[in-house]
Amino acid sequence: MSANAVADSALFNYRRLTNEQLRFYQEQGYLVLESVLTPQGLDVLRRECMSAWQVEKDAFDPQKNWLHNSLLGDIHHRSPTTRKYYFAGPLVDVAEQLIGPNIKGATSQLTFKLRGNTMSFGWHQDNGYGELDPYNTISTLTALDHADRENGCLWLIPGSHHEGQIKVERTPKERAAAKEVVVPADDARGAPMPLRAGDALLFHCWMLHKSDGNLSKDRDRRILFLRYADADAVEVYSNRQPRLGRLLRGVSRFPEVRAFEAEL
């Protein structure tokens, strides 16, 4: 049976955040949601994402840069189950609770640390790479493998989103070259975020986070990264042009957002 013929409820576990979870997110800036994917959903997503990855990439190649080794963008164009998950999965319900009634997708990509990839990424905010206003965008990381300290799970600094936007100046040339953004932070405040395959970690766009390299000899660390934003969020770094993304809930005042990927 194809993924398109499988009911969403067989692939994803839908839920609403409790009042306790909402308070925790406001105070700490993150949440871990267990078993967002069903075993069947995890299996289908793994297969589709790896098929897409192998079309353009392969195993870790130390001769290539971090963009080649770690990222594959617009994965929802390549995987129908990812598209279903991104556009109408349980994370959209969560985003509506955390952001508001008007929601768009802002990013979909694979974020992999395959075995052999020991490169680390320093402390940063996701809004340091793509500053969106209003400042309520959320990042979500859905684990396609068990992730722990050995194979490069994420670390974050709970509560650091209260510090607000940290300005990091990058020239247009540096931005085009995807120069890594690193901000000073106290490692002692960091907490590892181990995940089981099928779990999702979500956090505020101002959350400070990092990841170490994958030191495992026989395990990959594959993540599906999805970002959700207010439907009218604009790119501060692009003269406040609207961030294009599929309108998922509610309305947008921008016609280009209303039209973007509407055919999907």
Image (spheres, grey):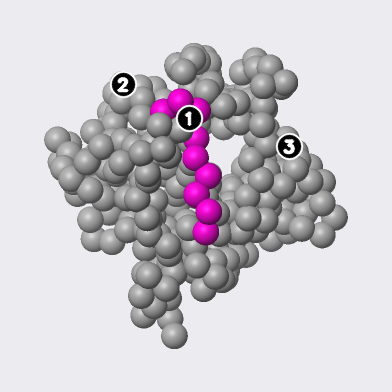
Residues tagged 2 and 1 counted as in contact (Cβ below 8 A): no
Mark toward the viewer: 3 or 2: 3
Sequence-wise, which precedes: disc 3 or disc 2? 3
Sequence-wise, which precedes: disc 2 or disc 1? 1
Q: Which residues are magenta?
A: 26-35
- The residue labelled by disc 1 is 29
Sequence-wise, which precedes: disc 3 or disc 1? 1
Give the farthest residue toward the front: 20
Name the residue: 31% across, 41% down.
97
Image location of residue 248, percent across then percent down: 26, 50
Depicted 61 relative to depicted 130: above or below:
below
Distance of label 2 from label 1 (alpha carbons): 28 Å
Distance of label 3 from label 2 (alpha carbons): 34 Å
Image location of residue 66, percent across then percent down: 67, 41
- The residue labelled by disc 2 is 239
Q: Quadrant of the N terminus?
A: bottom left
Tell me if mark 3 has few (under 14), some (14-19) or many (20+) residues whose alpha carbon lies within 10 angstroms of its own: some
